[in-house]
Amino acid sequence: MKYSIITVNYNNKEGLRKTIESVIHQTYRDFEYIVIDGGSTDGSADVLKEYDEQITYWVSEKDTGIYNGMNKGIAKATGEYLNFMNSGDCFYAPDILEKVSKNNYDTDIIVGRDYHYNEQTGKGFSTILPPRISMLTFYIQTLPHQSSFFKRVLFSNTLYDESLKIVADIKFYIQKICIEDCSIQLIDEIICRREPDGISKSYNERRIGEHQAVLSEFLPKGSIKDYNTLALLDKVTLYKFLRLIENPRSNKFITLCIKIINRIYG
């Protein structure tokens, strides 16, 4: 199975080098590596020249943002599955592609976990995946994009929405999973070791605005009120609640507990 690993970079020279090193040292070799640099002025192009023989295709030119760069990478990709490992993030271990390929997945989207590591504190945590994927997944948050593998054919009729600067990946997930009902496989493997702070955190107000606009595009107002109620629970509690409520044995017990609580506090 051939993979296309796509890296988008802008003025993150050292992060780019770290990402390149994690890609080119993968033990599984059936992949192509594509790097799209947005015309960096910090010497990133020199790093790309240094690794020229180990990168299948790279370009350094002005673009209109992250998703424009990702769409450029998609246009050059020829692999069966695409992964977007942007500069600063890296594969968790050298054998990640090998581990994923051994399972012979054939779903439209494969999703593993991220590991968020803070070098200053020496602490980290891994992503919690939901018990199942639904619109609620993208209302609360999203899936780990760097740890996802997408069949290239999914982009034949839908690219990333370049009018969005931060949450076009969320819109793409919603379109493919919730609207088109594409198949998805969640795996427990940690795929990506990522930087703790990305663009979505740096521009939090804009991220929230874009996120709400995307949700409103797909959800009627009445549904949004229901999701708002569910979102009152933190993500971990909500996922645990969903696992329990969908289990017939625990469902009766939870219902009884809710009735008791309602009698006490109702």
Image (cartoon, rainbow, N blue to C red):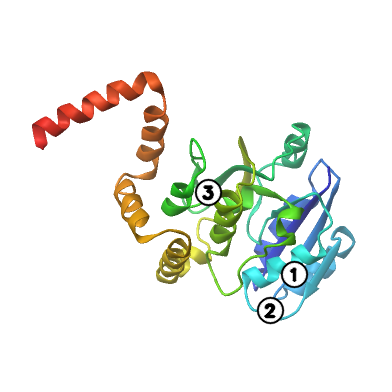
Image depth: mark 1 or mark 3 in front: 1
Marks 2/1: CA–CA distance: 9 Å
Of the image marks 2 and 3, the number of the one nearer the N terminus: 2
Secondary structure of residue under mark 2: loop
Is 160 rendered above or below residue 110? below
Query: Which amino acid, mark 3?
Result: His
Is 188 rendered above or below residue 120? above
Q: Where residue 13 is drawn, which disc sits there?
A: none
Image depth: mark 2 or mark 3 in front: 2
Secondary structure of residue under mark 1: helix
Quick one: label 3, few (<14), some, or many (20+) residues within 10 Å?
some
Is 94 rendered above or below residue 73? above
Q: In screen coordinates, is 82 left or right of 142?
A: right
Quick one: label 2, few (<14), some, or many (20+) residues within 10 Å?
some
Outermost residue, right side: 53
Secondary structure of residue under mark 3: strand
Query: Which amino acid, mark 2?
Result: Asp
Nearer to me, 20 or 99: 99
Q: Where residue 63 is drawn, which disc sits there?
A: 2
Rendered residue at 69%/70% (across/down): 69
Q: Quadrant of residue 207?
A: bottom left
Q: In screen coordinates, is 40 left or right of 47?
A: left
Horizontal and vertical percent position of residue 144? 56, 49
Task: Assess whether mark 1 and mark 2 are in contact (beta carbons under 8 angstroms).
Answer: yes
Q: Is residue 194 visible?
A: no
Q: Where residue 116 is drawn, which disc sits there?
A: 3
Horizontal and vertical percent position of residue 84? 68, 56
Of the image marks 2 and 1, the number of the one nearer the N terminus: 2
- Which residue lies under the disc numbered 1? 72
Horizontal and vertical percent position of residue 266? 10, 37
